[in-house]
Amino acid sequence: MTLPDAERLDAWRSFLTAHAAMSKMLSRALEEDEDLQLPWFEILDALAMADDKSLRFSELAERVMANPSSLSRQIDKLEDKQLVAREKSVSDDGRATVLVLTPEGHDVWKTASLTYYRIVRRVFTSWLTETDVVALHRVFSKVLEAD
């Protein structure tokens, strides 16, 4: 096996470092400003962006890139805080369960999203040119296609 060339390996390491730094900044800001863990925000955000503010468990797991057991524990905690609820799906025969953003969860998401997207804008998006955006879409599309 051969290693990737030094330039591509350096790009990979830069990506990992940037991702870790962003996660750390977002986690710190959400915990300090909103008393909310980053994985919880990501779940609330996925539900807030979904049609009807609800998703099946498998759809949510895919959107937040979480393994099922970890996601299940997170959902339990969010249910305890009454930010999400499990409900019977009305779009099929009623046997499926969907996760729904509660009104309180929506309020928490709305406030927390101001913090989250302020950091994303300040640290990431405000530095990107249109050329950068196109290039990043192209690169990340290739990564996702390779999966």
Image: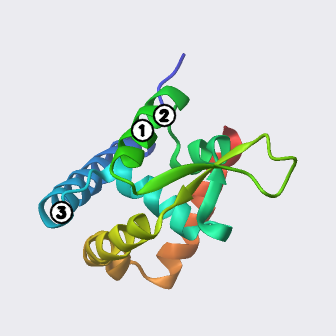
Distance from the alpha carbon under mark 2 to that under mark 1: 6 Å
- At 52% across and 68% down in the image, what residue appears? 48
Position in image of residue 132 (x %, y %): 48, 74
Whichever of labels 3 and 2 marks the residue nearer the N terminus, that label is 3
Mark 2: few, some, or many residues within 10 Å (few <14, many ≥20)? some
Residue underneath mark 2: 72
- At 71% across and 46% down in the image, what residue appears? 145
Give yes or no for contact between labels 2 and 1 (Cβ–Cβ under 8 Å): yes
Position in image of residue 135 (x %, y %): 55, 68
Q: Nearer the viewer, mark 3 or mark 2?
A: 2
Q: Amino acid at mark 1?
A: Asp
Say if residue 11 shows up in the picture.
no
Mark 1: few, some, or many residues within 10 Å (few <14, many ≥20)? some
Whichever of labels 1 and 3 marks the residue nearer the N terminus, that label is 3
Residue underneath mark 1: 76
Question: On residue 145, which mark appears?
Answer: none
Distance from the alpha carbon under mark 3 to that under mark 2: 24 Å
Mark 3: few, some, or many residues within 10 Å (few <14, many ≥20)? many
Q: Quadrant of residue 50?
A: bottom right
Question: On residue 29, which mark appears?
Answer: 3
Distance from the alpha carbon under mark 1 to that under mark 3: 23 Å
Q: Nearer the viewer, mark 1 or mark 3?
A: 1
- At 35% across and 44% down in the image, what residue appears? 80
In what element is the residue under mark 1?
A: helix
In which quadrant will I find the C terminus?
A: top right
Q: Quadrant of residue 138?
A: bottom right
Q: Is residue 142 left or right of residue 45?
A: right
Q: Quadrant of residue 68?
A: top right
The answer to whether residue 17 is above or below residue 46 is above
